[in-house]
Image: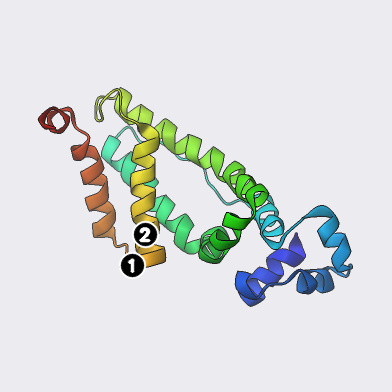
Amino acid sequence: MAATAAQLCDVGYLNMTIEGVAARAGVGKSTIYRWWPSKAALVVETLKSRSMLSPIELTGDSRADLRAVIASTFQIVTHSPAGMILPALAVDLIRDPAAHEQLHALLRPRRESVLTVIRTIAARGDLPADVDAGLLLDIYSGTLLYRVLLSGEPVTESIIDQLTDLLLSGTAPHILLML
């Protein structure tokens, strides 16, 4: 794992090769392939061994809690090793269902933590009791990923505030009754 992490830091995901990892680790390429069937699987396993997903601490203030979750997700996508290689890794994950599932398993605890925060906010009455927590998470994650990976538009503190307010007010019972 250390050799893979070092290669990722030195050359990035696109330029990383199994040969380079094997050479750095002092083993043959076949040794790597014996344990990991693909570059994507090796990288996901490396990310799993170095997970930096910190626990989410609730403050009791629904807006502050939701904003903190959105801001921390943005930090993960833009400043963590996993986030920085995500664009290139995503392409390989489409072709590698096993590595794709490994990444989902890696992210599952974070997703569950965020879902708990959203359900807690709903239990406080600041979101509808029957809010689809998974959809809400996907909406804000999709917005952040779109801006970071596709549009190139910045994710500023103001955008995080607007997204927080939109999610809280856009799912409010009075808005839903108007639909």
Q: Quadrant of the N terminus?
A: bottom right
Q: Residues within 10 Å of mark 1 (few under 14, many from 20)?
A: few
Residue depicted at 76% across the width and 66% down the height: 3
Return the residue at label 2.
Answer: 146
Residue depicted at 22% across the width and 35% down the height: 171
Q: Amino acid at mark 1?
A: Ser
Q: Report helix, strand or loop for mark 2.
A: helix
Residue depicted at 35% across the width and 36% down the height: 59
Q: Report helix, strand or loop for mark 1.
A: helix
Q: In 3D space, how far apart are the residues under numbered discs 1 and 2 (Cα atoms)?
A: 6 Å
Return the residue at label 1.
Answer: 151
Whether residue 74 appears in this view of the structure is yes
Q: Is residue 37 left or right of residue 86?
A: right
Residue depicted at 48% across the width and 36% down the height: 113
Residue 91 picture location, percent across and down = 55, 62
Check the image and report above or below for 64 versus 89.
Answer: above
Residue 169 picture location, percent across and down = 18, 38
Check the image and report above or below for 123 versus 99.
Answer: above
Q: Which residue of the protein is positioned furthest toward the front in this rendering?
A: 95
Residue 81 picture location, percent across and down = 57, 62
Q: Is residue 175 left or right of residue 111?
A: left
Whether residue 68 appears in this view of the structure is no
Question: Are dots 1 and 2 in contact, CB under 8 Å?
Answer: yes
Q: Quadrant of the C terminus?
A: top left
